[in-house]
Image: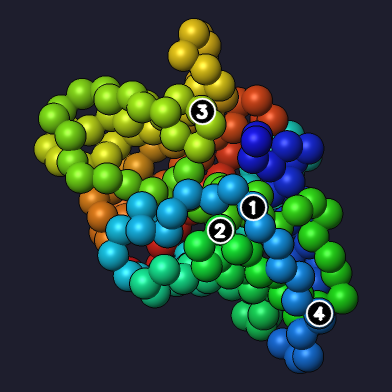
Amino acid sequence: MTLLSRLRIFFLAGFLLTAHGCGGTAHPTTEHKVFLPPIIELGQDFVWRQRIVATHSRGTMSFGSVLEKRGTHLKLLGLTPFGTRAFLLEQDGSQMRYTAFTPQRLPFPPEYILHDVHRVFRISAGEPDGWHCQPSMGVRMCNYWRGHALFKRALFHNISAKGAFVTITYGAGYVTNRPPPRVKLVNHEHGYSLDITTLVK
């Protein structure tokens, strides 16, 4: 499944910037099963405050979020520009739960956001220096390691694909539970980029 097709993350940024919620009563929660990688592949428990800047030909928008992993439970809290809750995404095993705190609705299935989280932040034990490829989430994932830290990631639709449809760079390098201050994801297929800054580690 391709992440964020039809510029999903771009519209998410717009959704958050135009939301006028004040953290009041939540809208009904929706639950359904989706294919998501095991939460254990995100490493040890953490709570990260992040700022995401989404850039596309139509402009640039930004929003805040809090990403938390506790045991086998993953939460992503999206924030309005006022710092109040916009939505909450939770993963427990293969079960995903979405709760909205504003009248606005996401213009796409919310599980795609969690797919992006996994594609960027899942990590394994360090490999020898160089590129290492393996199947992952229905695509071919190639990681570039140096000094036991992850510096680059490229995703290909299949083993014979000549170009990556998503590339990710990890700045000073990513080690489990110690993400670099800035991560950049470029989706060449859908023409957008994400700059993810971790504010609190």
Residue drawn at x 81%, y 79% is: 28
- Disc 1 designates what residue? 34
Query: In front of the other: label 3 or label 2?
Result: 2
State the residue in front, 58 or 76: 76
Q: Amino acid at mark 3?
A: Val
Residue drawn at x 26%, y 23% is: 131
Q: CA distance from mark 4 to mark 1?
A: 19 Å
Residue drawn at x 39%, y 37% is: 169
Q: CA distance from mark 1 to mark 3?
A: 17 Å
Q: CA distance from mark 2 to mark 4?
A: 20 Å
The disc, 3 or 2, on the residue closer to the chain's N-terminal end is: 2
Q: Secondary structure at mark 1?
A: loop
The local crowd at label 3, few if under 14, some if 14 to 19, many if 20 or more residues have their Cα within 10 Å, is some
Q: Are marks 1 and 3 in contact (CB under 8 Å)?
A: no
- Disc 4 designates what residue? 28
Residue drawn at x 77%, y 85% is: 26
The reply to whether residue 181 is in sight is no
- Disc 2 designates what residue? 94
Tell me, for residue 139, which label it has, or none.
Answer: 3
Quadrant showing the C terminus: bottom left
The disc, 1 or 3, on the residue closer to the chain's N-terminal end is: 1
Q: CA distance from mark 3 to mark 2?
A: 19 Å
The disc, 3 or 4, on the residue closer to the chain's N-terminal end is: 4
The disc, 2 or 4, on the residue closer to the chain's N-terminal end is: 4
Q: Amino acid at mark 4?
A: Pro
Q: Residue 82: x percent and y percent? A: 68, 80
Q: Secondary structure at mark 3?
A: strand
Q: Are marks 2 and 4 in contact (CB under 8 Å)?
A: no
Q: Are marks 1 and 2 in contact (CB under 8 Å)?
A: yes
Q: CA distance from mark 1 to mark 2?
A: 6 Å
The disc, 4 or 1, on the residue closer to the chain's N-terminal end is: 4
